[in-house]
Image (cartoon, rainbow, N blue to C red):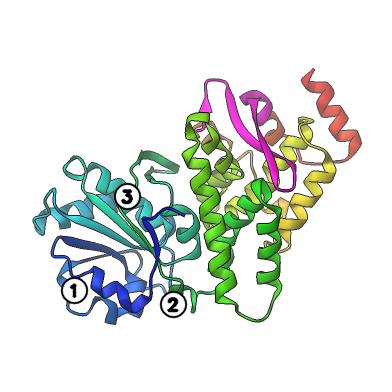
Amino acid sequence: MNSNIKYININDLRSIFRDDNIIMVVDHNVYNNYKYIFLGYEDRVILVGDESANDIISDCREVVKDFRTFDYVCNELTNRKATKNTHLYGIGGGGLTDLVGFLGSVYLRGVKVSFVPTTLLAMVDASIGGKNAINIGTIKNALGTIYPPENVYITTQFLDNSPQDLLFNGFAEILKIGLLFDINLLNDCFLFLDSKDENKDKLNEIITKSITHKIKIISEDSLNNRAFLNFGHTIGHSLELEYNLSHGNAIAIGMIYESQIAVLLNLIDICIFNEISRTITRYFNYNIEDYDLVKSADKILLDKKITGNKIITPVITEIGRAKLVEIKLNDFINCISMKFNLSTKNNMAYQSSLS
């Protein structure tokens, strides 16, 4: 794992905050529930997010990834006389680290940024890899940069009081990594999630494995391998904003839908789809009738992963292995426009309509 990603005890965070150049952008709930961490450093804290939320550790999600919050934090930095020497810290969930990473990359043409992710999703995904963004209206991640953080401090003690649904939110991205690259990681997730006993060492091992896979893929980005990490995201992002879903739930559903499309286009066997579906629905309940993909198709057309009239998307060839395929955008949208039904008859009929 990269040397700039460090596990740290929650009480040792205070020693990091002693640096006079640090300004911290902190989720309201993290601040309210862990005030002792920030004791004596209150003047360096900028609070964002929903202060009325009741979660022990919340994930700001998309609410902070907008121009309003961006403008507010920029003004706060100006009022606090932030300079090129300022080191900006994002302390919170994935939405917050996305915002802070983007802001740090453009404020004064770039200042140092570090993250203290407080949710599992942020620990394994949002804070890793340097991708940062804010949304424009209902277009997710429309403005973004790749700007790696100086350091990422992982403090799993933040997960001790994490609500189960927020924990599962992070596991959606870990299951994605397992489905794509590592059946052993997938089995580790099953053992951990199915066990009634908390095993922090096992959780740390799962987090480390997931991060290691993501870093490896990012290091091979010259081969466009970062596109593997988009599994479930083309459809998932559209559902996330259309139905105000958590990122993890949206991606879980997106992985199922995109695998259905792969079956309809004869890219994978239906048996593989069934394995993918069983893996995801083991922990994520969803009803296909609850989501109208046609309604969100316009958001898919604006997805940043679409180039010209095609989209490059990963498909699972067997559990733990995947490949990238190029799909015509019209075929992708046509699959969305029809009622998903994976019976042999309907699959063959659709194949015929494409020829």
Amino acid type, callout 3: Gly
How far apart marks 1 and 2 lie (CA) works out to 20 Å
Crowding near the residue tagged with mark 1, few <14, some 14–19, many ≥20 C-alpha atoms within 10 Å: few
Q: Nearer the viewer, mark 1 or mark 2?
A: 1
Q: Mark 2 falls on what kind of element?
A: loop
Is residue 85 depicted above or below 45 in this figure?
above
Q: Which residues are magenta?
A: 305-332
Q: Position of residue 88 (x, y in %)?
A: 23, 56
Q: Is residue 310 left or right of residue 21?
A: right
Identify the mark nearer the N-term, 1 or 2. Answer: 1
Q: Evaluate if marks 1 and 2 touch, with contact meaning CB atoms under 8 Å apart.
A: no
Marker disc for residue 42: 1
Is residue 329 depicted above or below 112 in this figure?
above
Q: Which residue is mark 3?
A: 101
Quarter of the image where the C terminus is located: top right
Amino acid type, callout 2: Ile
Amino acid type, callout 1: Glu
Q: Position of residue 27 (x, y in %)?
A: 33, 66
Is residue 152 depicted above or below 15 in this figure?
above
At 52% from the left and 31% from the top, the residue drawn is 224
Q: Which residue is mark 2?
A: 56
Q: Is residue 98 magenta?
A: no
Q: Is residue 86 left or right of residue 220?
A: left
